[in-house]
Amino acid sequence: MPKRVDHEERRTQIAEALIQVAGRRGLHAVGMRDVAAEAGVSLRLVQYYFETKEKLLFYGLKHLTDRFTTRVSARLAAAGPDPGPRATVEALLLASLPTDDESRTFHLLYSSYAILSVTDKALAAQPFIDNPDAAENALTGLLQQAQETALADPAVDARTEAISLLATTATMGTSILVGQRTSESAIAVIHHHLNRIFTNNHTTPPT
């Protein structure tokens, strides 16, 4: 009896190969043949599951997003059963900093995809972020929650601060990638901004 193929598992295998190759060479330099070799499968099989490179990139980056969500969940679990708004904000921001191999790949590929989509119409036609304002909305809600419970400065504008925190974290991440600063100094900058916003300046130790 022929072995039953788990198609989703096969797609995940190929997506993992894409992430590994792109993490080493850069997203722009990756071809479907490279991904096939990394996954240990034929080029024809990669083309069977993903007709074009753009579709492969789209699926691979969505898979990377799922892994990022898992990282955030792990940070929140480590913070305890009721982490509160500040610890939750820290988990969201610090998980995206390139402080280890996986988060480095995450930051590198997301940045690369955004840049490539500016000039590549095929990529731009299928944006990998289904809800581009999701992170901004989540942080805004957390900051408003902190204000309502007297944990954050009531005078700050939650939406503006959320945008600022996300922009700062993205910039700090790039500065780590290019060797401009260490992950410790980048984390210190983020904590500086959080200390300005939150009235209770207790911080969770970075991991």
Image (spheres, rainbow, N blue to C red):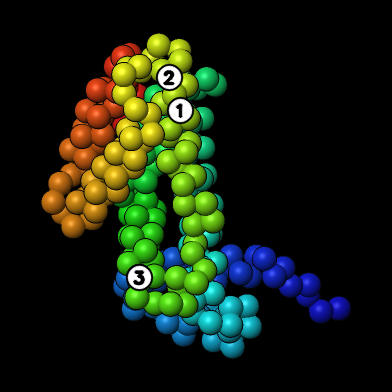
The local secondary structure at tag 3 comes to helix
* Residue located beneath label 1 in the image: 142
> Marks 3 and 2, how far apart in space?
36 Å
Comparing 102 with 162, the one in front is 162
Name the quadrant of the N terminus.
Answer: bottom right
Where in the figure is residue 99, as x and y percent of width and height?
Answer: 30, 46
Q: Amino acid at mark 1?
A: Leu
In the picture, the disc for residue 146 is 2
Quadrant holding the C terminus: top left
Say whether marks 1 and 2 touch (CB < 8 Å).
Answer: yes
Q: In the rendering, at what x and y percent does residue 21 appear?
A: 39, 71
Residue type indicated by callout 3 = Val
Decide which of 168, 97 is in the foreground and name it. 168
What residue is rendered at 18% in x and 57% in y? 178
Q: Position of residue 50 (x, y in %)?
A: 58, 78
Q: Circle 1 — which element?
A: helix
Residue 25 is drawn in which quadrant? bottom left
**Mark 3 or mark 2, which has the lower sequence index?**
3
Please identify the residue farthest to the top as the structure is shown. 150
Crowding near the residue tagged with mark 2, few <14, some 14–19, many ≥20 C-alpha atoms within 10 Å:
many
C-alpha gap between disc 1 and disc 2:
6 Å
Q: Residue at x 38, y 34 (%)?
A: 159
Residue for badge 3: 118
